[in-house]
Image (spheres, rainbow, N blue to C red):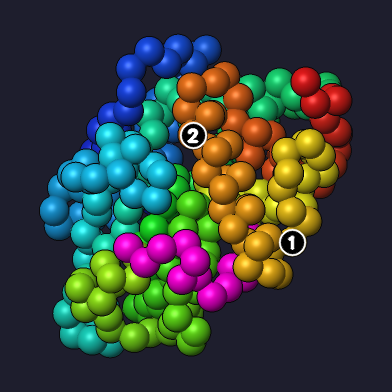
Amino acid sequence: MRVPLMLTTAVGWSLCSGIAAAQTPAHVDAVKNAQKSAYAVVESTNGCPAADRDLFGWPRNLVLNCEYAKQDTALGRKRRAVAYLLDVKPEVIARWIEGACAELRNKPADCFKKVLSAGQGNSGYMFALSGNILEDMDQPRVFKNFFFRNGMTVSMQRGLNGSGQDLSIEEQRRLALSPNDAIVSIPSGMTRFWRTSPAQFRARFPGSGAPAAVDTPERRAKWLDVAQKQMLEALQRPKNRLLEAWLCATARQMFATSCKAPS
């Protein structure tokens, strides 16, 4: 996913209280700046209010109900979309990155910066619980639909993802509120904010019950459950194991090092 950096004011994010601050104000400020890439929030048309009900096991106070619009020159007007996003404080994301970097052997000085940039480039710091994340596919003014569930791309209807169909808000919301068992495929299972695959998570945490792939309905359902559980737990803990698994799988390529044994 290519996400433009929005040169607008920082977006306020609310979550439950009682979460410890990150180690450095500079890290928190860097995350705030990266969160400006969350175009479903920055370009929202409804102010992204909190959801009025729980959503597939996600508590409503953590869910942002975002309607947004992006100018589509081909259509001659703005293209509208709806997405339900997880509401995460910048302090929490900063703490997750710090915790993941601490797992590296011989931690490089630029670890925080590179991991932050990777999350921004992949997701724009939008963790889509459900709904449509419009993507430009690196082609100016060409937008395509991609539906999500629990931070990963899913297909609610064959032939829809990657299409340029101009869907009504009502149709998008109907698809977004369809149950998990209505999902017909999960192309990769890679979760945002970064790109954690089920195989990466299983390798780092073999006792987690994560499947090696998402090629059957049972494995898809299991990975959806594991990803949701891990993200909810991470909101209250110093580390995000989804991030840790991704970083440890890519540490050699990114930093020419490896991770310590998981704690």
Q: Which numbered disc flags the more N-terminal residue, 2 or 1?
A: 1
Q: Is the magenta stretch mostly helix, strand or loop?
A: loop
* Residue 65 in sight here: yes
Report the span colored magenta: 177-189
User: Going by the image, does 237 lie left or right of 17?
Assistant: right
* Residue 139 in sight here: no
Q: Residue at x 73, y 38 (%)?
A: 208
Q: Is residue 135 shown above or below 221?
A: below
The total number of labels drawn is 2
Give how far across and how far down residue 197 sits, in percent. 69, 53
Q: Mark 1 points at which residue?
A: 213
In-front residue for pair 223/111: 223
Name the quadrant of the C terminus: top right
Secondary element at tag 1: loop
Secondary element at tag 2: helix
**Residue at the far left in the pictured view:** 46
Q: Mark 2 points at which residue?
A: 232
Give how far across and how far down residue 98 sits, in percent. 60, 23
Q: Which residue is drawn at 50% across and 52% down?
A: 151
Instruction: Name the residue type under label 1.
Output: Ala
